[in-house]
Amino acid sequence: MSDAEKIEAIAAEYLARRDNSAWTDENQQALDSWLAESTTHRIAYLRLSHVWQRGDRLSALRSPGPQAKQKIGVTRLPHFSMQRVAAGIVVAVVLGAGWFGWYGLNGDSSPSLHYSTAVGARESVALADGSRLILNTDTRLRAAVNKAGRKVWLEQGEAFFEVAHDSSRPFVVFAGDRRITVLGTRFSVRRHGDEVEVVVEEGRVQVAPQLAQTTVTPTVVTRNQKIVSEGGNVLVVLKPAAQIVNELSWRQGKLVFDQMTLAEAAAEFNRYNVKKLVIADSAVAAMRIGGSFDTGNVVGFTKLLQQGFALTVNDNGAEIKISK
């Protein structure tokens, strides 16, 4: 069986299980995690889901017996051993019926909305429930907000969330292997690889693993706290309000450094600029700096390094090297 066929089989299994009344929150979390792993997973699931639902509607217009469903090519399969057959049947229907559009995984036909920013760009987004998002540089996410719930999948980058309060529909952000749940608050989520950072400006959020069987305990993070989590490691830090403001200064297009190493400052600038800063040696990388800078003003930053620290700056067009 090819990788594509395996993915279709898993998608078909999830669809069959979801029709079962025993579908649980843990099942949904496992599905969300699998979908977040790959665009290929999402496309396979969306295609099969649409045709699966379409098959049900067509069946309702015909005889309700099993023969009608066999004509359509969709069947409800109770055992996983039959899921590969289901996948093959449904894929055949997809190929015959064509592509019907990009539908959200929300339990209804509401679309998931996709947002992204280029390197150095920011974007403000208003969601249907009144919540507001600010996407930072090089960020990609999708959002599904409807009667069934409010969910955002952060695929990469960083976003700030100002969530409208709605006790009947918790707002959930999926980032890496973490699930961040809130009712109404202001916080940011940054994802780089498997590491997830959450900074809370106001209110409280719960950060928990997506998979229920993990041994990592859910953590509640409150105002002026930051949590960094990766795998089984979780670190929560209480910060002065001024430091939280500095960490979130990117919303105004600023980078604020407070005795940060030059290596760390260069890494932050590199998030926002195509031309990268390269630190030539460890002694220069360990130097401490402070100040406020525009995210795109690499030239001004390097000039200050020349003037204030007598460092050598070499711009070769592709990158900027900094040395003694």
Image: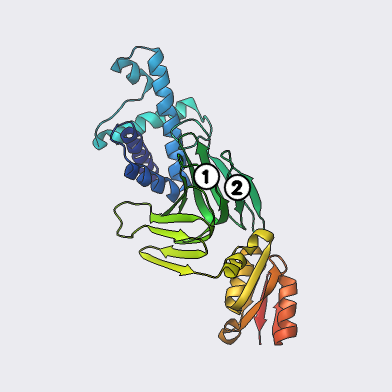
Q: Quadrant of the C terminus?
A: bottom right
Residue 268: give x, y in percent of width and height: 60, 69
- Mark 1 residue type: His
Q: Quadrant of residue 128?
A: top right
Q: Is residue 274 above or below residue 211?
A: below
Numbered mark located on residue 14 in the image? none
Q: Is residue 317 visible?
A: no
Is 295 positioned to the left or the right of 20 in the image? Answer: right
**Could you tell me which residue is drawn at 29 percent across and 53 percent down?**
213
In the image, taking residue 151 as reference, residue 67 lies left or right, namely left
Element carrying mark 2: strand
Task: Sort mark 2 into few (<14), some (14-19) or many (20+) by Cα contacts within 10 Å.
Answer: some
Q: Which residue is mark 2?
A: 132
Tell me how many marks there are. Answer: 2
Q: Which residue position holds label 1? A: 165
Location of residue 285 in the rendering, given as x and y in whole percent from the top left corner: 58, 81
Q: Which mark is first along the chain, 1 or 2?
A: 2
